[in-house]
Image (cartoon, rainbow, N blue to C red):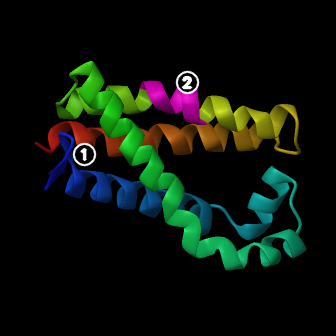
Amino acid sequence: MRVMGHNVFAIIVAALLIYVIEFVIFAVLISPEQYMAFTGITQAQVDGGEARMPFGIIPPLFAAIGLSLCIKWRGAQTLQGGAMTGIILAVLFAFGTSLYGFVYGPHTPHYLLVNLGHFLVCWAAAGAVLGAWK
């Protein structure tokens, strides 16, 4: 199914892929204690935010829609073209925006590296799906 030339199923799969990769990184590979140390948040803040967890699919969905738009605009509708578009956008937009948490907030330099890796993997994988899926 296509909407304005964009494959809706590919966008959904790309968003779910981002969501799953983020879960693996932030819920499996990094312990809660390590995450709190990286980000400067407390257990009380974590506990207070649990009610918002169902909304966690929205950022990956927005990212997948944006990636789909950029891949189409670039004419990069191949696996490699989609992955490269994802990498470019991961660094310039996703990681660039996350720097605010470091510059003006409590995020540590180590968390910057984790975040950069997370965005590169997530957005490259989602871009590859969107680029390759005709």
In percent of width and height, residue 3 lies at 21, 48
Residue range corresponding to the magenta coloring: 88-94
Q: Does residue 89 belong to the magenta stretch?
A: yes
Q: Residue furthest top?
A: 74
In percent of width and height, residue 122 lies at 44, 46
Label number found at residue 107: none
**Helix, strand or loop status at disc 2:** helix
Q: Are marks 2 and 1 in contact (CB under 8 Å)?
A: no
Label 2 CA crowd tier, 10 Å (few <14, some 14–19, many 20+): few
Instruction: Look at 46% across and 49% down and name the residue there.
Output: 62
Front-most of 80 and 74? 74
Sooner in the amino-acid sequence: mark 2 or mark 1 = 2
Residue type (three-letter) at the residue carrying disc 2: Leu
Q: CA distance from mark 2 to mark 1?
A: 20 Å
What main secondary structure does the magenta stretch of the protein show? helix
**Helix, strand or loop status at disc 1:** helix
**Residue 18 visible here:** yes
Kindly indicate the quadrant of the structure image that contains residue 111.
top right
Front-most of 104 and 65? 65
Horizontally, residue 113 falls left or right of residue 48, namely left
Label 1 CA crowd tier, 10 Å (few <14, some 14–19, many 20+): many
Q: How many marks?
A: 2
Judging by the rendered image, the residue that carries numbered circle 2 is: 92
Q: Does residue 61 belong to the magenta stretch?
A: no
Residue type (three-letter) at the residue carrying disc 1: Val
Label number found at residue 129: 1
Horizontally, residue 67 falls left or right of residue 107, namely left
In percent of width and height, residue 57 lies at 49, 64
Instruction: Look at 81% across and 36% down and name the residue there.
Output: 102
